[in-house]
Image: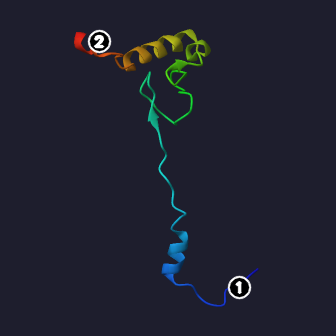
Amino acid sequence: MAVPKNRHTKSRRDRKRSHLKLEAVVSVRCEKCGVAVMPHVLCENCGTYKGREMVDVLAKLTKKDRKVKERELEESAPPASMEELSKS
């Protein structure tokens, strides 16, 4: 193993470590339910990707859990158009 001959200064050490910082996780909102998800990934909450349903999330749940999930999806779904906003 190599043994350093001379000591490196704090500034030189810190400059070397400047690229080792953590980056913030990027997330976007699901178009259907509004939950934060990773970009280019299927939404685990509602089973959609790019506005299209890819996985039927409700099919995997029991009857009791399915009713609860359906209520959550109805409540959290943003209105689709300005007409729906003006009606309420």
x and y percentages locating residue 15 in the rendered image: 51, 74
Residue 3's tag is 1
Which label sits in the foreground, 1 or 2? 2
x and y percentages locating residue 46 in the rendered image: 51, 21
Q: Secondary structure at mark 1?
A: loop
Look at the picture and state if 17 lies above or below 69: below
Q: Residue at x 42, y 13 (%)?
A: 71
x and y percentages locating residue 75 in the rendered image: 37, 17
Look at the picture and state if 43 lies above or below 12: above
Give the quarter of the figure containing the C terminus. Answer: top left
Q: Residue at x 48, y 43 (%)?
A: 26
Label 2 packing within 10 angstroms: few (<14), some (14-19), many (20+): few
Q: Residue at x 43, y 23 (%)?
A: 33
Label 1 packing within 10 angstroms: few (<14), some (14-19), many (20+): few
In-front residue for pair 75/51 = 51
**Quarter holding residue 59:** top right
Q: Amino acid at mark 2?
A: Glu
Q: Earlier in the sequence, mark 1 or mark 2?
A: 1
Q: Secondary structure at mark 2?
A: helix
Question: Is 34 left or right of 82, judged from the image as shown?
Answer: right
Give the residue number, with chain letter if any, for mark 2: 84
x and y percentages locating residue 17 in the rendered image: 54, 69
Q: Residue furthest bottom?
A: 5
Q: Amino acid at mark 1?
A: Val
